[in-house]
Amino acid sequence: MSDGDTSTAANPPRRIRRLRGGLSIQSKLLIMLLAVSLASSVVVGVIGFISGRDSLRDSAIEQLTTIRELRSTAIENEFAAIQRGVLLDSRNDSAIEGATAFVNAFAELQATELSPEAAQTLDSYYSDSFVPALEARSGLDYDPSAFLPASPAGRYLQSLYTAGRAYDDYDAGLALVDAGDDSAWTRANIQYGPYFTGLVDTLDYEDVLLLDTDANVVFSAYKSVDLGVNMQEEPYASSALTGAYEEVMRNGSLDEVVTTDFERYLPSLNVPTAWVVSPIGSATEIIGALAIQVPIDQINRVMTGDERWAQQGLGETGEVYLAGQDELMRSTSRLLSEDPEQYEKTVVENGTPVGVAERIVAVNGTVQLQPVDDFAVKEALKGRTGTALAAEYTDPNSLVAYAPLDIAGLNWVIVAHIDQDEAFAPVNVFTRNLLLSTLGILIAVSLLSLALAQIFTRPVHRLVGAVHRVAEGDLDVQVPQGSRDEFGDLGSAFNDMASSLRIKQELIEEQQRENEKLLLTLMPESVAAKYKQGEEAITEAHENVSVVFAELVGFDDLARGMPAEQEIALLNTLMRGFDEAAEKAGVEKVRTLRGGYLASSGLTVPRVDNIRRAVDFARNLRAVIERFNAQNGTQIGLRAGVDTGTVTSGLVARTSLAYDLWGDAVSLAYRVRSVTGEPGIYVSQTVRDRTQELVTYAEAGTVETQGRTETVWKVV
């Protein structure tokens, strides 16, 4: 029977080891279900992801390409309409008759001289009004005399039509018809001026100029600083307008139309300006040229879609812009229009020079200022059309669609772009939804597989967790005892074990706290730490330590015949008072005797004023005795000795612990206390010398120490 019992007891450990070395049926089933579910979900997910991602990406690219094509067609049609309009307007009978009248009237004014007052007014206009504004706008310096028309006719017209108003009051110039001088030019302006100014009002042109065959500006709709100037003279000789004028006059064809790129035009305060120029005349004679200033606002309206970017499929970050051969923008930036402050920060972060960004924000325009020397513009300038993921001036990762433009006379390109994150946001949403769906399937299968296994293993898991917590020191743990089977019995046994361990641990901890408290009453914390570490010889040498040796006088007489309990109670009262005085004075108690008290200052905590503290402590002890006598009607006295110097502290014995302090300072403190046999506070010569300015002393006698006589002083 004994052998059979041994075999039965030995078998379970071997079965447990086999279970731990392999997988349970539940684990295998769980792994199989998860593997099948994961494999099927991954296959379906990958196929759906690739198909959906490519479809959504293609849709985003196609949408951006469509927007680019629509804007390309719109801007090309816009310029074609302006060019056709200028060509038709230059052939109009009213335009020919009006141009002829203005040319002839301008020629008549060449013999007119300005009065000194009119000349002064014109000079003041340039020096005080126009040139300061131009310098402020451009950041450059200009000579006012350079802008004065060279011809008498030009100066005459500007003195009447230009100098009499603010430089930026263009509406006033447009409305000014009759200057009241009854000159041929004024009569021509009364008759034909409304036709040309009507082109500005109805077609939204920025300005309309008429030039004669000598390049004189004989008419300006706004009658600004270019009225009456010669475009072949400085400062206009090298301008794009002059080049276009010379080209149409040189070709000699009435069907000629020349369009200029944007260029900073001085009469418009250095604002970028583009022109469309066509000759005016009959089949037999060309009398001059009609120059239309291209409306930049109209270009921006076309490119921004009237600033309805989001509604037109460009989201929060998309836009379409124009760029020239110099890789600078020819239309306004969306971000600048919506948030100038954010625009400056963004473009600087993406490579635009700080000075350029500040200038753009200051003038509120990006034409011929904002660099767009990125991949899309470079490719389009090479005549290529396409899409790509590339950097843009507002974002290093953008979806771009680019193409060259077909505008006669201009080498411009068009770029549509949108931040890659926004363009492919549907792809990201689709990917996230697919991953979440796959994860949901896996979780559902996992939960279903785990449900039954958890029913059987839940009690074991609870018990294992409780054992781990006990191992970590948590002895308050208890496991539920819900089932009435072997698991319930095992839980009950575990709870009994945990309760027993908790009770024993509490007893041990309580004993440790009492031992710690007792140890700290016998010695300083530093010595106690060494003692607990098992050191055999624990001693410490201390320099510059003051020692107070105090003893009670008359306590034995008081306690004689007194019950032991009462004697101890009185003694405890005195010792508590001494302890409080020690704490207040900042001194350390070394040990307490039945009739005495040994303390030090500067022993465990070095103090520069340890002597003063020791004397103050001794005086405080005297005050404690006096209060005790007053409260109990006794006449106990105090003899205390104080000295300072080098001492040694340590444990005197290890089997019966006794922390003590010894050395010359302790010996002398002990001896000086009894120099007269009377109660009082007695100090050595060294203590007296160091505290005589703070305490009043009287000589009390002498003691012999180490072969010399030491004078003893008493605190008065």
Image (cartoon, rainbow, N blue to C red):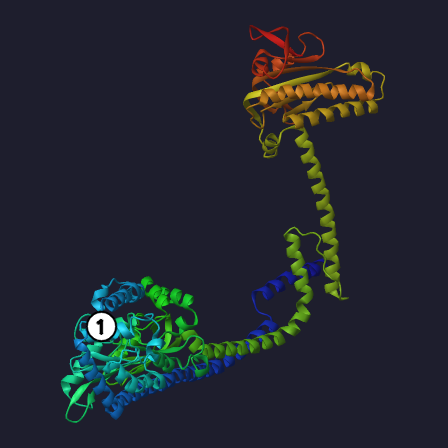
Which residue is label 1 attached to? 155
Q: Is residue 644 left or right of residue 496?
A: left
Tell me the residue at 22%/86% (across/down): 101
The image quarter containing residue 323 is bottom left
Q: In this view, does 163 lie above or below 499?
A: below
Type of the residue with mark 1: Arg
Q: Where residue 471 sits: x, y (%)?
A: 64, 52
* Residue 2 in sight in this render: yes
Q: Position of residue 118 (x, y in %)?
A: 25, 69
> Would residue 470 appear left or right of 388 to someone viewing this image?
right
Quadrant into which the N terminus falls: bottom right
Which quadrant would residue 392 be assigned to in this image?
Answer: bottom left
Q: 149 or 257, which lies in front?
A: 149
The quadrant of the rendering that contains the C terminus is: top right
Residue at (68, 19) in percent of width and height: 619
Q: Where is residue 702 in the image (x, y as percent from the top left)?
A: 62, 6
Residue 256 visible to an observer of this rendering? no
* Residue 404, placed above or below residue 123: below
Tell me: residue 108, above or below residue 481: below
In this view, the residue in front, 573 or 648, is 573
Residue situated in front as seen by the camera: 20 or 509? 509
